[in-house]
Image (tube, grey):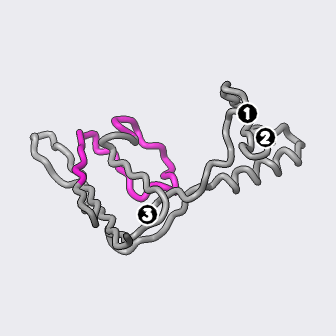
Amino acid sequence: MLHHRGCRRKYSNRSPGNSLYDWDHAANVETGEQITLNPEDGDEEGKAALEAFQEDNKCYTIEDVDGNTVTDPQGTLYMTANSASGSKYYELISTQQDYIAVRSQNWLPSYSIITMDAGKFSIDTYQITDDGSVEAIDDTFTIEKTAK
């Protein structure tokens, strides 16, 4: 599974010309329109605006990939391997988010090695077991670039 962003940010929690964070609204950065993030019961217009905001704000795609190699993907790819982000040593939430291909919590230190040249980017992730040995967590993930 490959996840990447492919759109420009249309909404912000800061109103145009205002540096303060607004916890209750999202502002359309182009029009300045305020969308209430928690419409009152019975506010059908507010609920419709929130639904449109949520649908319009899906700025990522999820694509199925055969194997662990992709060629010439478009957009920005975000990869984490629990070595720099993610659950750390916290419990995982019960529902896996749709933008996460694989997740685990093994309570062991981990690290990733990135190998890169002009045509290929690969990432390998390892864990250090309780006895101090090192073992691969996942198969190598590779991005190949053929376009100039």
Give the residue type that dot 3 points to: Leu
* Residue in the picture at 42% in, 65% down: 1
- Nearer the viewer's eye, disc 1 or disc 3? 1
Left or right of residue 124: residue 143: right
Q: Of marks 1 and 3, which one's residue comes earlier in the chain? A: 3
> Which residue position is annotated with label 2?
32
Residue 60 place in picture, x, y as percent: 55, 57
Residue 108 place in picture, x, y as percent: 24, 40
Q: What secondary structure is the stretch in magenta mostly built from?
A: loop
Give the residue type that dot 2 points to: Gly
* Residue in the picture at 67% in, 35% down: 13
The crowding category of the residue bearing disc 3, from other C-alpha atoms within 10 Å (few below 14, some 14 to 19, many at least 20), is some
The crowding category of the residue bearing disc 2, from other C-alpha atoms within 10 Å (few below 14, some 14 to 19, many at least 20), is some
Could you say which disc has been placed on residue 15 in the image?
Answer: 1
Q: Nearer the viewer, residue 98 or 12?
A: 12
Tell me where residue 91 sits by quadrant: top left
Does the magenta portion include 100? Answer: yes
Could you say which disc has been placed on residue 136 in the image?
Answer: none
Under circle 2, the secondary element is loop
> Which residue position is annotated with label 3?
2
In the rendered structure, are the residues bearing label 1 and label 3 in contact, judged by CB atoms less than 8 Å apart? no
Query: In the orientation shown, which residue stands out farthest toward the front?
Result: 148
Q: Quadrant of the C terminus?
A: bottom left
Q: Of marks 1 and 2, which one's residue comes earlier in the chain? A: 1
Give the residue type that dot 1 points to: Ser
**Bounds of the magenta segment:** 87-114
Q: CA distance from mark 1 to mark 3?
A: 33 Å
Q: Nearer the viewer, residue 2 or 119?
A: 119
The crowding category of the residue bearing disc 1, from other C-alpha atoms within 10 Å (few below 14, some 14 to 19, many at least 20), is some
* Residue in the picture at 47% in, 59% down: 3
Q: CA distance from mark 1 to mark 2?
A: 7 Å
